[in-house]
Image (cartoon, helix red, strand yellow):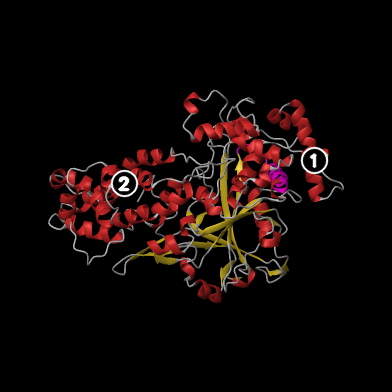
């Protein structure tokens, strides 16, 4: 199906390609409990022994085929090459990256490593959502690779600066592979970008602070003004960045912040002065050189020839120095208070640029995490309307805890989507199943929402019980039961029953397109939600963010491109084809 809403890589139905000179061993495939032809995908189990498969870990190869390119790595020794010689544990990867990034010998390597769980490859939609990491697409960590087997991560010593793909950290019989990506900036030399990323990563990774629970962590430096403030204050070692957990950065937030700074701040004195002012910028650049040299070793330290020069992202977007000017800590605090208390319409002071401006990619919000999961594992076409509704409601306690929204608040955003989803289903099936449709869908929804089928309840009884209540707030004055939510989900169908009976049924694809178009305004409303507490999460940057951009599930800045090029796997799990 060709649709702008349906991801063509995730839902590709052709055979997967596995390019390169290596393949998975039989033992590795046995440990992962998957066939070679399906590696990097997940089978979703439905009722009545039905299932469908999504290619959630795979990516585009050579511009037209979907699959993976395997490269062996080894943290503790050599690896066999295709010509049966031995090479360093990082050598094949480094050569491959250099070819893709068109780097010369001696040029700096910088890529991202997005780690995933191949063993999480089968289950029901509910089990995948609650018992695996599929709410994050099975991708649970992102680090950076700097070449010669050296990685950086948050927490700082996670993987001990090695690849960490052998599974030893989790003490499992299988590995912990990672997809390799890099980011390019339009019109700029990749080696220069890589070098700048190295500088920023080195500074921000030194003593990086990791939150206790990253899944419920606030990501504050999501806009360019706050990100520049963070970098300045980190260089100046301001205590709040170490004492206030709401400023800590988990793995994906850390790498997002690194990329935002690097793509907007060439590391030379003039560029620092453009961002931070003439005197402060000169002083801050000297401080950067001192801090950087102390980290890597003061001899010879950072030299003039190490400076980087390119047109930063903010200039490419034709922003002014005044627009990208960093916040001060007090400025940020007053702005953040005004925003959370709905005072911005009368707030007289400077506000930051939107998180979509001058950042390589925008952060996600709670609705995006939910939307991505449904679109991948519980979409209308493959899983059906009831499964989609089940997941949307099932995410409620997770979102309530993370973003500080009430049950009523969540349902105000969710119920219009549930009603439209069931109406789309009715456009396909109601006329064909007119004698049984309402009662059968009610039972399916009732069960999906946790109801016990032995309970004596039916939709006619529920409609009578609801009486003239049409407002969600009035309905929720009663207990929030599976029967009430199931009935409410079908109200649009009930209200339009005559039209449905007088119209020709739509195909599933036609109903899907209309559904997706109709819920976009609801998605945008949900994105505008703001928590009241400074600990409530507004922005997320999941570990899968860079992979999602590469496969077209999420947009990057128009001047930034993500290239997903290969998958590194422990050498013990690969053999020469």
**Helix, strand or loop for disc 2:** helix
The residue lying toward the viewer, choosing from 380 and 366, is: 366
Q: CA distance from mark 2 to mark 1?
A: 54 Å
| Mark 2 surroundings: few (<14), some (14-19) or many (≥20) residues within 10 A | some
Where does the image place residue 23, in percent across and percent down from the top left?
56, 69
The residue lying toward the viewer, choosing from 563 and 256, is: 256
Q: Which residue is mark 2?
A: 415
The image's mark for residue 299 is: none
**Residue 62 visible in the snapshot:** no
Q: Is residue 499 magenta?
A: no
The image's mark for residue 289 is: 1
**Helix, strand or loop for disc 1:** helix
Residue plotted at (73% across, 58% down): 148
Q: Nearer the viewer, mark 2 or mark 1?
A: 2
Q: Which residues are magenta?
A: 186-203
**Residue 344 visible in the snapshot:** yes
Residue plotted at (70% across, 53% down): 146
| Mark 1 surroundings: few (<14), some (14-19) or many (≥20) residues within 10 A | many
Q: Is residue 196 magenta?
A: yes
State left or right for residue 525 relative to residue 565: left
The answer to whether marks 2 and 1 mark residues whose Cβ atoms lie closer than 8 Å is no
Where does the image place residue 81, in percent across and percent down from the top left?
67, 68
Where does the image place residue 214, in percent across and percent down from the top left?
56, 53
Where does the image place residue 558, in percent across and percent down from the top left?
53, 37
Which secondary structure class fits the magenta region best?
Answer: helix
């Amino acid at each position: 199906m060709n649709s702008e809403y349906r991801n063509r890589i995730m839902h590709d139905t052709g055979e997967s390609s596995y390019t390169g000179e290596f393949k998975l061993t039989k033992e590795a495939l046995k440990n992962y409990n998957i066939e070679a032809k399906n590696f990097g995908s997940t089978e979703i189990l439905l009722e009545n022994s039905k299932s469908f498969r999504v290619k959630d870990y795979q990516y585009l190869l050579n511009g037209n085929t979907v699959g993976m390119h395997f490269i062996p790595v080894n943290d503790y020794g050599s690896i066999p090459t295709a010509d049966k010689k031995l090479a360093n544990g990082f050598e094949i990867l480094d050569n491959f990256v250099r070819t893709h990034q068109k780097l010369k010998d001696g040029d700096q390597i910088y890529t991202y490593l997005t780690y995933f769980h191949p063993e999480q490859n089968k289950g029901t939609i509910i089990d995948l959502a609650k018992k695996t990491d599929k709410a994050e697409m099975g991708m649970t960590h992102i680090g950076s690779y700097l070449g010669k087997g050296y990685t950086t991560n948050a927490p700082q010593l996670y993987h001990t600066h090695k690849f960490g793909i052998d599974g030893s950290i989790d003490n499992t019989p299988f590995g912990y592979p990672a997809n390799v990506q890099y980011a390019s900036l339009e019109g700029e030399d990749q080696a220069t970008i890589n070098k700048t990323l190295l500088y920023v990563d080195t500074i921000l990774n030194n003593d990086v602070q990791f939150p206790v629970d990253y899944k419920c962590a606030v990501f504050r430096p999501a806009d360019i003004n706050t990100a520049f403030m963070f970098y300045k204050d980190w260089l100046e070692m301001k205590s709040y960045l170490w004492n206030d957990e709401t400023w800590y950065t988990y793995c994906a937030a850390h790498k997002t912040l690194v990329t935002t700074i690097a793509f907007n701040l060439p590391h030379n004195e003039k560029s620092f002065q453009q961002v931070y002012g003439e005197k402060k910028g000169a002083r801050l650049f000297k401080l950067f050189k001192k801090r950087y040299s102390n980290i890597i070793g003061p001899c010879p330290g950072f030299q003039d020839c190490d400076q980087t020069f390119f047109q930063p992202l903010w200039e490419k977007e034709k922003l002014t120095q005044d627009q990208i000017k960093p916040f001060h800590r007090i400025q940020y605090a007053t702005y953040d208070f005004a925003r959370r208390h709905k005072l911005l319409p009368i707030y007289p002071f400077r506000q930051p640029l939107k998180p979509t401006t001058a950042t390589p990619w925008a952060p996600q919000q709670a609705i995006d995490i939910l939307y991505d999961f449904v679109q991948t594992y519980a979409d209308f076409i493959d899983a059906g309307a009831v499964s989609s509704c089940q997941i949307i409601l099932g995410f409620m306690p997770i979102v309530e805890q993370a973003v500080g929204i009430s049950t009523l608040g969540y349902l105000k955003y969710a119920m219009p989507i549930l009603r439209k989803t069931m109406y789309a289903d009715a456009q396909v099936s109601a006329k064909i199943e007119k004698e049984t449709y309402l009662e059968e869908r009610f039972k399916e929804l009732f069960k999906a929402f946790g109801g016990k089928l032995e309970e004596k309840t039916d939709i006619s009884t529920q409609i009578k019980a609801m009486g003239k209540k049409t407002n969600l707030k009035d309905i929720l004055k009663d207990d929030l039961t599976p029967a009430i939510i199931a009935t409410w989900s079908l109200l649009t169908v009930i209200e339009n029953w005559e039209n449905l009976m007088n119209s020709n049924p739509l195909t599933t694809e036609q109903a899907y397109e209309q559904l997706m178009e109709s819920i976009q305004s609801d998605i945008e409303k949900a994105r505008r939600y703001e928590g009241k507490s400074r600990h409530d999460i507004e922005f997320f940057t999941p570990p899968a963010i860079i992979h999602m951009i590469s496969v077209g599930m999420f947009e990057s800045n128009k001047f930034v491109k993500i290239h997903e090029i290969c998958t590194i796997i422990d050498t013990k799990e690969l053999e020469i084809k």
